[in-house]
Amino acid sequence: MVLQTESQQYFYGTGRRKSAIAKVRLYPDDGTAIIINDKPMEEYFNWLPWQSTIREAFAISGTVGRFRVQAQVKGGGVNAQAEAIRHGIARALVVSDPGLKAGLRRAGFITRDARVKESKKYGLKRARRAPQYTKR
């Protein structure tokens, strides 16, 4: 979805992973800043593998340095939040240029990863772990 604020046009994408939801805006710009929850990415995600996860969609599509990212993310753990932002960036890139969709889909960034934790069952300790059996 292409939206326009007071003076700037941006491309919007929603990313999800487990219970994390990311609302991502891509502004056509010099592309140096990635702001997450009003903090620089290096401050919010202080581990390099999380930062590289977020940048993967730009590397695959060849759009490094063309967009400034503004993201709001909530829910889930830190890794799920990073993957939700990557999903949102990939969706917003497709809105900006539909020609990028094939490469991003091949990398698996367009499809929402639907794996979530299985719920606990009654009579069991966890989802599948049964209480220990004692014969005597």
Image: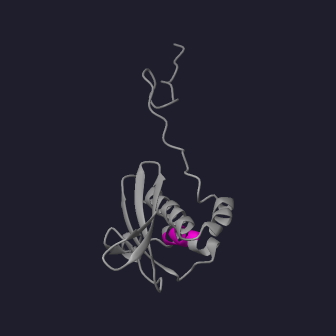
The percent position of residue 74, horizontal first and vertical second, equals 35, 56
Give the image location of residue 8, x and y in percent: 37, 78
Front residue (pair 45, 10): 10
Residue plotted at (65% across, 59% down): 105
Q: Is residue 7 left or right of residue 11?
A: left
Q: Position of residue 16 (x, y in %)?
A: 47, 53
> How many callouts does the rendering have?
0
Q: Residue at x 58, y 57 (%)?
A: 110
Magenta residue check for 100: no
**Image: 64 above or below 127:** below
**What main secondary structure does the magenta stretch of the protein show?**
helix
Q: Farthest top residue?
A: 136
Residue 107 figure quarter: bottom right
State whether residue 77 appears in this view: no
What residue span does the magenta drawing correspond to?
51-57
Using the image as rendered, state which of residue 96 and residue 47 is in the foreground.
96
Instruction: Based on the picture, tell me whether residue 53 belongs to the magenta stretch.
Output: yes
Nearer to us in this view, 58 or 42: 58
